[in-house]
Image (cartoon, grey):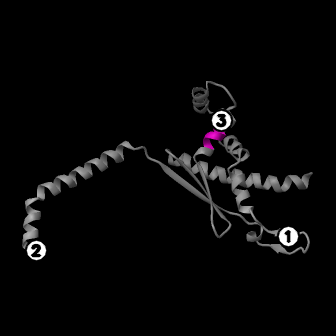
């Protein structure tokens, strides 16, 4: 088959090619408009841990402390941190939030705990494999709300972490 034969075949089938192209563009556009928009905000936390060996007094690097980063991830995903996020956002005083809670639960249960559970469903916490960096991501439909949630979870984690270090010293 020569190049001129191939070209004549393509010209003869040009309407099929145009129809397939237009159909693909149309279907892609419709799907793009129908699907809801989802936004993702990510904030990064650096875990700076300096622990001393109880026997020698030497400072231990994070890799020698097994499970420390995993513990920090668990703290980030904890109900305590989520409840602090609910309190920081003032959800309990928001009329729209109260209506949403009443509609979903018919008024049964605690609004703070219900929203804490709802918020942690869209939360994603990913620790780095080789460093002490943790990414906190939040997904949702409103870009401003999603950014506020990621930042508020990071702030609540920092407060909780400080509390966990200071409380034993106070005791």
Q: Name the residue under label 2.
A: 3
Q: Nearer the viewer, mark 3 or mark 2?
A: 2
Q: Main secondary structure of the magenta part?
A: helix
Q: Which residue is drawn at 71% across and 64% down?
A: 47
Relative placement, left or right, of 170 versus 116 is right
Q: Marks 1 and 3, how far apart in space? A: 40 Å
Q: In this view, does 116 lie above or below 102?
A: below
Q: Of residues 171 and 59, which is closer to you in this image?
A: 59
Q: Marks 3 and 2, how far apart in space? A: 68 Å
Q: Mark 3 or mark 1, which is nearer the start of the sequence?
A: 1
Element carrying mark 3: helix
Relative placement, left or right, of 108 versus 9 is right
Q: Name the residue under label 1.
A: 52
**Residue 88 place in picture, x, y as percent:** 68, 43
Q: Which residue is drawn at 77% across and 67% down?
A: 65
Q: Name the residue under label 3.
A: 114
Q: Marks 2 and 1, how far apart in space? A: 76 Å
Q: Of residues 163 and 128, which is closer to you in this image?
A: 128
Q: Residue at x 90, y 56 (%)?
A: 169
Quarter of the image holding residue 128? Answer: bottom right
Q: Residue at x 68, y 50 (%)?
A: 77
């Amino acid at each position: 088959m020569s190049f001129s034969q191939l070209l004549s075949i393509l010209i003869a089938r040009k309407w099929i090619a145009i129809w397939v192209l237009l159909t693909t563009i149309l279907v892609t556009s419709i799907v793009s408009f129908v699907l809801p928009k989802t936004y993702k905000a990510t904030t990064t936390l650096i875990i700076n841990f300096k622990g001393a060996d109880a026997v020698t007094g030497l400072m231990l690097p994070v890799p020698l402390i097994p499970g420390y980063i995993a513990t920090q991830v668990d703290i980030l995903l904890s109900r305590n941190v989520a409840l602090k996020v609910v309190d920081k956002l003032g959800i309990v005083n928001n009329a729209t939030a109260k209506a949403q809670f009443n509609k979903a639960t018919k008024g049964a249960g605690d609004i703070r705990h219900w929203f804490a559970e709802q918020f942690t469903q869209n939360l994603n916490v990913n620790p780095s494999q080789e460093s002490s960096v943790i990414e906190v991501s939040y997904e949702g439909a409103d870009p401003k709300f999603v950014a506020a949630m990621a930042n508020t979870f990071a702030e609540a984690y920092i407060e909780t972490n400080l509390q966990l270090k200071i409380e034993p010293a106070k005791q």
